Amino acid sequence: MALYANIIIDISHEKLDRLFQYRVPEELKPVLKIGMQVLVPFGSGGRKLCGYVIELTDQAEYDVRKIKEITEICKDSVAIESQLIALAFWMKKNYGGTMNQALKTVIPIKQKTAAKEKRILVLAADEKTAEEQLAEFRRKHNVARARLLEALIRERELSGDVVKEELNVGLNVVRAMEKLGILKIRTEQDYRNPVRQREREERKFLLSESQQAAVDAVLRDRREQRQGIYLLHGVTGSGKTEVYMELIAHNIAEGKQAIVLIPEIALTYQTVRRFYDRFGNRVSILNSRLSAGERYDQFLRAKRGEIDIMIGPRSALFTPFSNLGLIIIDEEHESSYKSETVPRYHARETAIERAGMTGASVILGSATPSIESYTKAQNGEYHLLEMKERISKRPLPTCYTVDLREELKTGNRSILSRKLQELMEERLAKQEQIMLFLNRRGMSGFVSCRSCGHVIKCPHCDVSLSWHSNGKMICHYCGYEEPEAHVCPECGSRYISGFKAGTQKIEMLVKKRFPKARVLRMDFDTTRKKESYEKILSAFANHEADILVGTQMIVKGHDFPNVTLVGVLAADLSLGVSDYRASERTFQLLTQAAGRAGRGDRPGEVVIQTYQPEHYSIVAAAAQDYASFYAHEMEYRRMLCYPPVWNMLLILSAAKNEELAYQASERMKRVIAALGYQNLFVVGPADTAVAKVNDIYKKVLYLKHADYAVLVDVKDRLEHFINGNRELKNIVVQFDFNPMNGF
Ligand SMILES: Nc1ncnc2c1ncn2[C@@H]1O[C@H](COP(=O)(O)OP(=O)(O)OP(=O)(O)O)[C@@H](O)[C@H]1O
Ligand SMILES: [Zn+2]
Ligand SMILES: [Zn+2]
């Protein structure tokens, strides 16, 4: 049978869609693979160009007599692009979507914008002359010139941006001073290094015993050419970052590069600084605030070998390092490692795939590993490395659980329990700092009782029902619904509703209760402006405030040694969301929040306020006992066939017309049934959490099967079915394997 290769000649954003088809000659059939670089005839005139194989198919796209043949596989077919294209193909295969979507995710796409030219002003006069000039400018009231010269004397060099934006000095003034010979202008290609330049503070700790043991285990394997996958399970404050840095240093010594993934929210100045202090300018970062051009520049620097370490959120995984030796995923349990757009890849699985292509090691680090990863560590798929103690044998914090139902009974309706108020007062007197944490996730509209703590759940799925504004409570897993409750079905109380207090209200209440305390708030509202996130964190770190009130974003990996008290205001908030991972997330959040207390010389205390003090995720978090949480959670996953015991696939169909979306789901369901798989559970079509957005209706099918490969096959068949059915063209179909956030 004839085999054809679809080939891309130019990897740039606009041309990614332009594929050219060539015939694969007989002798290349057994060896040609996706991603390989090949030489092909192009145009008339006998010109030959290099291209990359994107797809292999037996379908000729046009007249077979006109299809030319691939000339040869390029000798040096190991270009980094080849590897990334192969990775894109793997992603398309495993997560669904088109090859084009996968390529756009993976390839550092060229943009038309060239690297910026940066103008740097350098002081050209000697100090004495400069001072005299300055005096003269002042005498003549040349304020702009004086301002510029004063800054130049102080800094010696100034970037054009600073002069324009911060000093507010125009180009004519700069030119005039250049003429006077006071300054020189130098231009540089600006690769827009996003790491703020500053003095390096070289710091290197003597590793603790358990840190050293973790490092040694990885290095031993590498010496024996075994590139493993490691789960570094280290309690909060055990010093995981130091382990990463030590491994990176060895990796660089071997001439290899490293990628460090960090959840965006934890990618702060503080974290970047620790890496910068150790590795200087060989580090770069990616974050969502960089423009497309700036991101491209960072990839270019990596490709040219100007840096050895890239730190960033999940997209940093595609940094085109040609000799990648190490991928680190910090806080590996974080849901932000799962992409929310097609292809809906998981950075952990994709990192392991990429590492496999180059023989790199993968380190997954967390104080609260995901149930998936811990299971793999138990099965021996990952090597488990444990650090059970904090640095310098500092104790883990002492946790108190407060039953909010009891507080209500004693007449305390405040959001602050008596225990928490008492401890806060004590800390304020001692000038130690406090963090108050409200674990509220997006739109979690679940319904619970304030008197007895009861949460209304789906009778079929054991996840909580979501409250919809149409007065119904709906299960997002199976579509079950019932009318909104007005009295608690457990105790008859009328205190049944969603939890309403937000961080702003809490800030107000805290200020009222502790009028002398300085309070900072960090949440979505206060961090919208660029840099405000950093500002709040550094103000708190400098003890410009006594209390920090905030959401999830205050708990992620921060290291504030003066914090000795953490209050979790309503632990149940993250428990009530309609998601089988709710307990896992709650345990992780509480453990991480508790882990912020007592990181310095003084021990910490934690108050967990809850309506469900007996819930296993809360009991285990209060005891900081991962093992018991894991055992309990796995029992639940096994019983209900949830991942990682089984695998799940969500299939979304979205359309402007509700009936169309529904019908598409129904048709897919019939196609799935016809495949005849045993023990494949299909539920739906059901509404998604927000069933209608911008007049687009969304329906979803929930599939469960023990074998991931079966679900991939279902996806393949459905993609084929959709491509062959014109009338489905107006429907958007998306796949989500083992969802983290759902649709
Ligand atoms: N070997 C060491 N000797 C002394 N101090 C250390 C050592 N290693 C790390 N530290 C310090 O201990 C503190 C905790 O380390 P780090 O932030 O890496 O912990 P972690 O394991 O990442 O914790 P978390 O999971 O809570 O973020 C930091 O202030 C760090 O500088
Ligand atoms: Zn009740
Ligand atoms: Zn249900």
Image: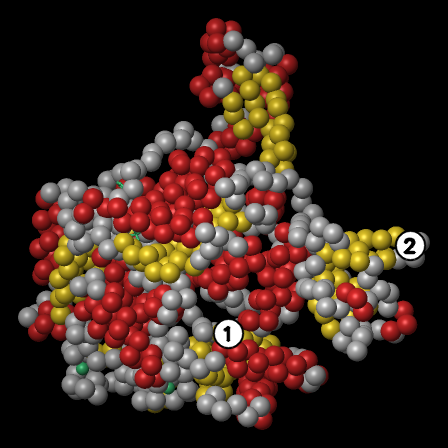
How far across and down, in percent of the image, does residue 261 sit? 45, 53
Q: Where is residue 637 drawn, in percent x and y?
A: 33, 79
Q: Is residue 576 visible?
A: no
Residue 201, position as x, y percentages in the image: 36, 31
- Answer yes or no: disc 1 within 8 Å of ligand 3: no
The residue that appears at 62% across and 83% down in the rendered structure is: 717
What residue is shown at x 55% (from left), y 20% (from top)?
122
Front in this rendered view, residue 342 or 7: 7
Tell me the quadrant of the picture where the N terminus can be found.
bottom right
Mark 1 or mark 2: name the one nearer the start of the chain: 2
Instruction: Nearest to the eye among marks 1 and 2: give it.
Output: 2
Q: Amino acid at mark 1?
A: Asp
Instruction: Read off the residue under disc 2.
Output: 46
Task: Return the residue found at the far right.
Answer: 45
Q: Amino acid at mark 2?
A: Gly
The answer to whether the residue bearing label 2 lies less than 8 angstroms from the nearest atom of ligand 1 is no
For the rendered model, the colour scheme is secondary structure
Q: Quadrant of residue 6?
A: bottom right
Give the camera-side residue of 267 and 258: 258
Q: Which residue matches tag 1?
A: 736
How far apart are the alpha carbons under marks 1 and 2?
A: 46 Å
Q: Could you say which is closer to the camera, residue 654 or residue 95?
A: 95
Q: Callout 1: few (<14), some (14-19), or many (20+) C-alpha neighbours within 10 Å?
A: many
Cβ–Cβ under 8 Å for marks 1 and 2: no
User: What number is the disc on residue 85?
Assistant: none
